[in-house]
Amino acid sequence: MRFGGMRTNATTRARLVLVAALMGSAVGVVATSPAGAVTPTVSIRMSNTAPDVGQLVTISGTVTPNRAGQVVTLQRYAKATRTWVTYSRVALNRYSQYAYGYRPTTPGNQTWRAVFSTAAQPMAAFVAYRWIYLYNLDTAEGGVGRESVEINGQTFVRSIVDGSNDSSQWNLRRNCSTFKATIGLPDSEPSTRKINLAVYADAVSRVDQVLSFGQSKFVQVSIAGALRLRLDWTTAGDHWAVGAFGNAAIRCSW
């Protein structure tokens, strides 16, 4: 055969094959970037996206490729100053993973990000909630009694109390998730009394319960997205009666 205009024998051809193989190997080495040259990626996630104030939230993630022993910086966005504030620097374990435990001290939205080397800085958020007694809030409409009452033998020191055919409302700011209370007639009422107690999230009925003297019921219902909470008291028997929402509270992010 001829190679580059020259005639080659079997020995020359064998050498050319070897050179080509070596060149192929060299090309393969050049095309494969070393691990240190690869742009890393980092992830971030929350163990709970709707915790209560004081409840543990684990912020965790992974860096790829493996960067065991190196450090990820976790920052939280400060709305007041519009800056990112560093809360922790966490070393990656042998699996290139990190985890940081944080307990929110105030309600509201909190946005966090993970910072590592030249990687993009992903963000994750949670909304922290707190329980607020209606006892401590002004009504938006109507008026109620705020008392310590006994319902079916149990004392509720922060209760909302009113009589038949009354209604009151509270603003929720569309930032509350849950309402809870123990409902019934106060034990001071005549034993023949009955009352219908109802809970509304805007115009949506959440609770509608007739209770007799000596009865009680714990209720916990969603009020997510509602602008107003409304409590209703309606006569259920032959006589006007008093009803109580024992330790009535709402879970809100404000």
Image (cartoon, rainbow, N blue to C red):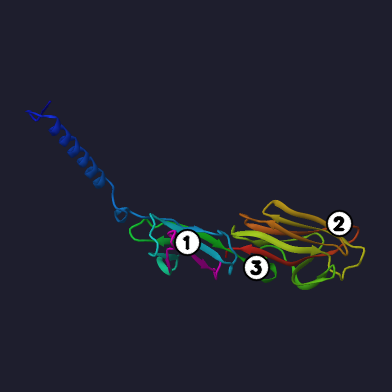
* Lower position in the chain sequence, tag 3 or tag 1: 1
The residue sitting at 15% across, 32% down in the picture is 13
Picture quadrant where residue 51 is located:
bottom right
Is 194 left, or right, of 251 in this rendering? right
* Lower position in the chain sequence, tag 3 or tag 2: 3
Name the amino acid, label 1.
Thr
Task: Say which of 232 and 1 sits in front.
Answer: 1
Q: Nearer the viewer, mark 3 or mark 1?
A: 1
User: x%, y% of residue 129?
Assistant: 59, 64
Picture quadrant where residue 242 is located:
bottom right
> Where residue 85 is drawn, which disc sits there?
none
Name the amino acid, label 2.
Ala
Task: Say which of 170 and 132 sits in front.
Answer: 132
* Lower position in the chain sequence, tag 1 or tag 2: 1
Q: Is residue 105 magenta?
A: yes
Task: Say which of 88 and 33 sits in front.
Answer: 33
Find the magenta span and give its range: 89-108
Q: Residues within 10 Å of mark 2 (few under 14, many from 20)?
A: some
**Callout 3 secondary element:** strand
Q: CA distance from mark 3 to mark 1?
A: 24 Å
State the residue lying farthest toward the right.
192
The residue sitting at 70% across, 70% down in the picture is 135
Name the amino acid, label 3.
Ile
The residue sitting at 77% across, 67% down in the picture is 161
Picture quadrant where residue 66 is located:
bottom left
> Where residue 132 is drawn, which disc sits there?
3
For label 2, the residue is: 236
State the residue lying farthest toward the left.
6
Q: Nearer the viewer, mark 1 or mark 2?
A: 1
Q: CA distance from mark 1 to mark 2?
A: 49 Å
